[in-house]
Image: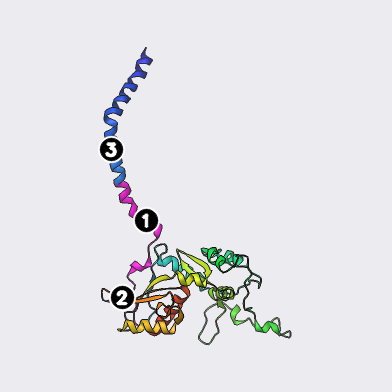
Amino acid sequence: MFNSQWNQRPHRQSNLRFRGVCPVVLVLFLIAGSVRVTAQSPFRLGQWLDYDSSVSGDVTKPGGAVVSFPCDPLMTARQEHQIMQVLQRECQPDWNPGTTIKELAESLSQHLPVSIDQRSLEEIGLDIDVEIDSVRLFDVGALDPHAATSEKQKWWQQTGTIHANQKPRGVMLVTAVMERLHSVDLTLQICDGRLTILTLEYAESRPVTRVYDVTPISTDDQSLAELIIRMIDPAGWEKLGGESTIQPIAVRGRRWLLVSTMTTTHWKVQRLLDRINR
């Protein structure tokens, strides 16, 4: 009897809570939960996106490098910088002449995020297993059969600081990659947080946007824009029938160039502006 009454009471009480108290508690719980999610969302979003170095307040200063930032919602300036650090490393590439596009991408993927735009390759009849040729990079001294094997270490084999009168130790990784891709009319594009291998035509039709702080360089931004169009890949700009665009803008006392073009053209624009500002 005791057990049956004990088992019945909680049942009636639970029905009472369900009909009366539980809905109120449930509503309060949902309200509290929604507030909690709202408060935490910005923090989680910031962690996922990482903090963009463009919020640091860096601006171009006279005599220095021109400050520029990518306008990519899926890539931060820090991510782009990390990709460029890898591409600018000096290397002695050991790819064989018969290296395929797929093998090249797999080799690069060991150091940075890489993708192949297969649709663009298919449109020109290329497969990822196509072999890519290149100019062979070799030591000219190795052609001399009488060269001593115990000779002094070559300049490109040395480590340490390079002085003004020394030659560079090797070629940049991006140089080695580009000379192989050019043999099959392919190029590189940095977007969406990764390095993409695609055709030149696709890269031209899908430009990436970047802003350059040109405040110290010139007071005539339009003339600067026209100089860039004339000197760097002139056939690719919209003004001359291409897809790339360039637009001067002024924001809070600073002058910027808003440029949409291929990644490789952006590299040239950056170098030109850096030299003009020095």
Q: Please state the horizontal and vertical placement of residue 152, each as a whole percent of the image.
A: 65, 83
Q: Is residue 28 visible?
A: yes
Crowdedness near tag 2: few (<14), some (14–19) or many (≥20) residues, C-alpha within 10 Å: some
Q: Please state the horizontal and vertical placement of residue 22, each as a whole percent of the image.
A: 29, 31
Q: Secondary structure at mark 3?
A: helix
Among the two numbered marks 2 and 3 on one chain, the one whose residue lies closer to the N terminus: 3
Among the two numbered marks 2 and 1 on one chain, the one whose residue lies closer to the N terminus: 1
Q: Please state the horizontal and vertical placement of residue 146, each as a whole percent of the image.
A: 73, 86
Distance from the alpha carbon under mark 2 to that under mark 1: 30 Å
State the residue position of label 3.
27
What residue is at 37 percent from the left and 56 percent from the top?
45
User: Which disc, if any, is residue 115?
Assistant: none
State the residue position of label 2.
249
Going by the numbered disc 2, the residue's amino acid type is Ile
The span shown in magenta is 35-63
Going by the numbered disc 1, the residue's amino acid type is Leu
Tag in front: 2 or 1 = 2
Are dots 2 and 3 in contact, CB under 8 Å?
Answer: no
Going by the numbered disc 3, the residue's amino acid type is Val
In the rendered view, would you say 10 is above or below 60?
A: above
Distance from the alpha carbon under mark 1 to that under mark 3: 27 Å
Q: Is residue 217 visible?
A: no
* Nearer the observer, 174 or 245: 245
Are dots 1 and 3 in contact, CB under 8 Å?
Answer: no
